[in-house]
Amino acid sequence: ANPQDIWSNVDTSHCTLRLLRPHEHNDSIHTMLSLLESEFGCMVGSNAYLTPLHSQGFAPHYDDVDVFILQLEGYKRWRVYAPPNKMETLPRESSRDYTEKEVEED
């Protein structure tokens, strides 16, 4: 894919571009994941996300896996919320997308 075409489409659509398993194509990322697996004693995977300026990548949600976020460029305001209820503390499935109103703090 032409990088200029990708960036122009991401910028004009305000959509996030998700790259699955970038470690399969980049030795530096693969090496970092190997070190994290050794340190944490568990399997580690990766995704990469490119989100245009003044855009939100995803609606509020929770995942069914532990997530470690490493932001490499730009800035973003990350929000972390308590689980909506006790049953969702250690979920077996990812959540649906929540609206901003559903996650507003009282």
Image (tube, grey):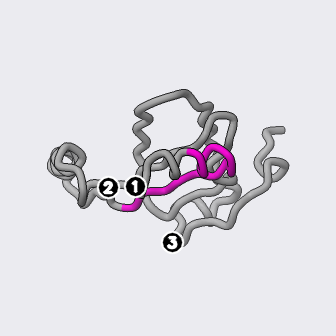
Residue 88 as seen in the image, left or right of residue 41: right
The residues bearing labels 2 and 1 have C-alpha atoms spaced at a distance of 6 Å
The residues bearing labels 3 and 2 have C-alpha atoms spaced at a distance of 25 Å
Residue 10 as seen in the image, left or right of residue 70: right
Q: Nearer the viewer, residue 105 or 44?
A: 44
Neighbours of disc 2 within 10 Å: few (<14), some (14-19), many (20+)? some
Which residue is identified by label 2?
22
Which structural element holds mark 3?
loop
Rendering quarter of residue 87: bottom right
- Look at the image and say whether residue 21 sits in the magenta stretch: no
Looking at the rendered image, the quarter that the N terminus falls into is bottom left
Disc 3 versus disc 1: nearer the observer:
1
N-terminal-most mark, 3 or 2: 2
Q: What residue lies at 68% left-to-right and 67% top-to-bottom? A: 96
Q: What residue lies at 59% left-to-right and 57% top-to-bottom? A: 62
Looking at the rendered image, the quarter that the C terminus falls into is top right
N-terminal-most mark, 2 or 1: 2
Q: What residue lies at 31% left-to-right and 58% top-to-bottom? A: 45
Q: Give the range drawn in magenta.
A: 8-20
N-terminal-most mark, 3 or 1: 1
Q: Please provide percent x and percent y for residue 90.
A: 51, 62
Which structural element holds mark 2?
helix
Which residue is identified by label 3?
92
Rendering quarter of residue 73: top left
Asked if 34 appears above or below 105 in the picture, the reply is below
The residues bearing labels 3 and 1 have C-alpha atoms spaced at a distance of 20 Å
Disc 3 + disc 1, Cβ < 8 Å: no
Q: Please provide percent x and percent y for residue 92.
A: 51, 72
Which residue is identified by label 1?
47
Q: Please provide percent x and percent y for residue 66.
A: 42, 55
Which disc number belongs to residue 35? none
Q: Which amino acid does label 3 sit on?
A: Arg
